[in-house]
Image (tube, rainbow, N blue to C red):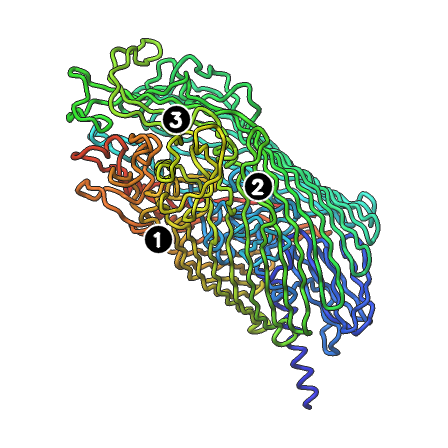
Amino acid sequence: MVNNKFNMKQVRRSAIAVAVGMCFASMAYAQNADGTIFGRAKAKEQVQVVSLENGSSRAIEADKDGGFTFSKLPVGRYKVTAGGKTREVSVAIGSGTEVKFDDVATVTVTGSRTRNPIDVSSTESNTVFSLAEIQALPVGRNATAVSLLAPGTVAGDAAFGNLASFSGASVAENGYYINGFDVTNMRNFTNYSSLPFDAISQQQVKTGGYGAEFGRSLGGVVSLSTKRGTNTWKGGASAYITPGWASAAGKTVVNQDKDAWISPSQPSYTLYSPTANTFKNLSYNVYAGGPIVKDKLFVFGLLEGRKNTSDTYGGATSQTSSAETPNGMIKLDWQISDDHRLEFTGISNKRRTSYQTFDNTNNADKYALRHVGTPRLSSVDSGGDVEILKYTGYLTENLTLTAQYGRLYSLLGRLNDPSNFGAECPAIYGTNGQPAYGCWNPAHFTIRDLKAQDDGDTRKGKRVDLEWIVGSHTIRAGYDAQDFFSTQAGETYSGGVYYRYYNMPASRTINGVVGAGTPGNSEYVRVRKYQSTSGEFSAKNDAMYLEDSWKVTKNVLVYGGVRSESFDNKNADGVSFVDRKNLLAPRLGAAWDMNGDASMKVYGNFGRYYIPVASNTNIRSSRSEYLEGRYYNFTGKDPKTLAPLTLGPEIGQAIISGSPTAPDPGTIADTKLSPMNQDEYILGFQKALSKNWVLGVKAVYRKVNAGMDDYCGHTGIAKWATEHGYADFDPDSLATCILMNPGRALNLKIDAKGDGKLVEVTVPNSYLGLAEYKRTYKALELSLDRPFDGKWGLSGSYVYSVNKGTAEGYVQSDLGQEDAGITQDFDFGSFTDGAYGTLPNNRTHALKLYGNYALNDNFRLGANLTVASGRHTSCIGFVPPTVSDYNGPSGTTNGGSGAYNSASSYYCLNAQGTTVLGSRGNGPVMPWTKQLDLNIAYILKLEGGRTLTLQANVFNVFNTQTVTMVNQIRDYSRADSKLPTGNKLNPNYGYPSSFLGARTASFTARYEF
């Protein structure tokens, strides 16, 4: 009886591991496009795995303890056999699936395709979704929407397209992969190359804890595997439509940006919810895959057509748009033999969007909510293509080699406009903030260098990986090299200059000068000049890694690894300005299979992660950019261009930033710069509560060790030079901004003696006045999963987190700034006063629930609920003249924080118009957001394995258009903030700038065979 009870206990444990196998959540083996089958058999027993999709097979001998591992297996279904016992399992992307044959009571399963959510072969954390699971949920058809289902992710700012923030990092710190190839936008990390959604096989969402094999991200990783051909021809057709008529009217914010003391009668914002703004999105797909040569050569292809149209209405303009460019994907797999495989993936995601733009020049037609006048025609080309070639070789039973080469090209946006670019007509705005057209074409506020290449990015990546299984050790080593090329055209204002007219204030105080206006003049003018240079900028990121997963005992896994990162960024002349070699990133972890049957696991890990310097930094830091602003009285206007005929006299100081010449590359960055890196600690627990439920608990702590941003203040450096005897040092010889680690001493090459020779000096941070770059994330995650069992399934998580620091990261959400790694946060020491506080991606509480319920064999319901606490806001304004870096070295605002004409600090005006210092996150907290999405599907199973699915999704069922962000700029303008008295408050402060999206509905028809 005792033995029988013991055996039944083992049967139950094995049954639990099998039954929960289709759960959404799993632990990851690595963030690649392959998976692993591992387990135990009898010592020295032959174990065979056979692909049920392409017929390939491998056989290895279990080690002396009975352990076996089949690595680098394509995602799909497999049959595993040992000692006359057979199991059928599914391999998920980047995950390990356990199979046991050493227990006499192990259940033999055939026909059940399982994967184990408690992966005791790894210490990593991720969530895996198959396309079928995604399609069954009311979730958007894009990788970001799926990523937001995972615990630890929250939606970022609308300014960046609502990308996902992972575990407190900014939305620009994630990595994106397709079939193991990095497709992240290297320019600013806020985009990635897309894949036709129906071509996805599985999506892996990693929120942290990955091993040394991969890096270059501080947030998370989104990895997609594509569909591939099998020995059975399969295919289908689908159509997805989101019609405007089935959606609620969204709230639109029209920012007229009126100067309250110039036009007090005009409202600063108009909020309306009209049905005038309309859209319709249509996507249709045909796809098929199968054998070209059975068991040898396979193909899968998909062609996606689309027709997305919209009509939008603003104050002075309205616009129609249409995008109809087809996309596609092809996947070829050549099973050369059972031991050698070659794969090719080709993706086209080119887009052309056509526009008709209407100018509502008649004041009576402002905000008319209809198209008025004759349209201007234009179009924008964007997107590009991806090619990936990969080889996998099982050189011996225990040695596996993979090699990959990929190329990605992305066109940022080529404007095709038959109208005149306005080279002879300057850009002009009138006193009411609207274009005073003259002959200027407002579609071309700035004009690009017509001799320059298209603005675009090219990535060329190659990597080689070796895996060697030696006894209880799985050793991996590899080399990964990526070359990037970013082209950027220089720009200037239309006509070479930009004028803006202002009504004369009653105080006649302009640009801080009292009584400056000429009597009788009702207007004055601001004159701006801007120029930047064209070029191609390159970056090279290399890495090597070595790691060992050691099965110390049958139930304990210890992981150790180290990754060496190297980053090299160059200017347009090919000269390096950041070149860092062999940055070591250690990774450690352990996992304990407490019951020995994958029903309970305790795990933990530590890792250091680096992120590269974005190629946008090459462009912004190493080319010349010059902006000059001056205020004038004037006499008369040109009848054609409306430009002022006679300027003068000038009013107040000129506001100048940048330089008309490119900086010496040796002066752009701290000579001892540490690229941004972060340490992460995770401690977690998973338990199968029953045959249906799996509980997870995880604690996460992240801390940025060395933040990286640019510093633009020259005053402190000039003071240091003077105090150290460099009387001939010219502060104007410095680069406009310098890449550094804020809060640390600045190691910089300068022309200290004014003789043209650079010498390296160290300027203590006490001269710079910068706060230390800080960011921490602390979280407790709870998850509960019940796999869909044919009747119902549910997954959910609750995360309590705290995200604080002096900087959000690679972007700045409060100001909508996407210059990755060179935000305004640390441009001057005074900008960091009060900078520590709650960060924009902090959502203290986040609850997610999603799942399905089958009403019967034909009807299925799906639901997705997200509830999250709101974002913290700040009061942002201009630094007062009392800060130490307000003036530059010359004693004027040039080169000082007083030259900034955009609000950038935590000094802001109180209700009495007095500047006071606040702190980050001390403004109103946004309300909680609550969104429920539902769907219903009708599934008709036809003869021959054919299926017809009709589905309706409704997003934001209750139409809770909660305010998600408000205008955080308290001070109206730099010129006005210099006034000693008067109305200096921004009338737009505190008004909504974005909302939770309105209720929308989409409809799906899908036929598959």
Residue, disc 2: 579
Which residue is at 45% across, 64% downward?
Answer: 780
Query: Of callouts 3 and 1, which one flags the residue occurring earlier in the amino acid sequence?
Result: 3
The quadrant where residue 329 appears: top right
Residue 427 relative to residue 512: left or right: right
Given the image, on which type of amino acid does mark 3 rest? Leu
| 624 versus 35 height, above or below | above
Q: CA distance from mark 2 to mark 1?
A: 32 Å
Query: Badge 1 is on which residue?
Result: 837
Amino acid carrying label 2: it is Asp
The reply to whether callout 2 and callout 3 are in contact (CB within 8 Å) is no
Q: Which mark is residue 504?
A: none
- Quick one: SS at disc 2? strand
Q: Secondary structure at mark 1?
A: strand
3D distance between C-alphas at marks 2 and 3 = 29 Å
Query: Does dot 3 land on a helix, a strand or a loop?
Result: strand
- Residue 81 relative to residue 540: left or right: right
Residue 524, image x, y percentages: 24, 20
Q: Give the residue type that dot 1 points to.
A: Gly
Going from N to C along the chain, the mark reached first, 2 or 1, is 2
Name the residue carrying label 3.
627
Q: Which numbered disc, 2 or 3, marks the residue closer to the eye?
A: 2
Give whichever of discs 2 and 3 has the lower sequence position: 2
Q: Position of residue 33 (x, y in %)?
A: 67, 51
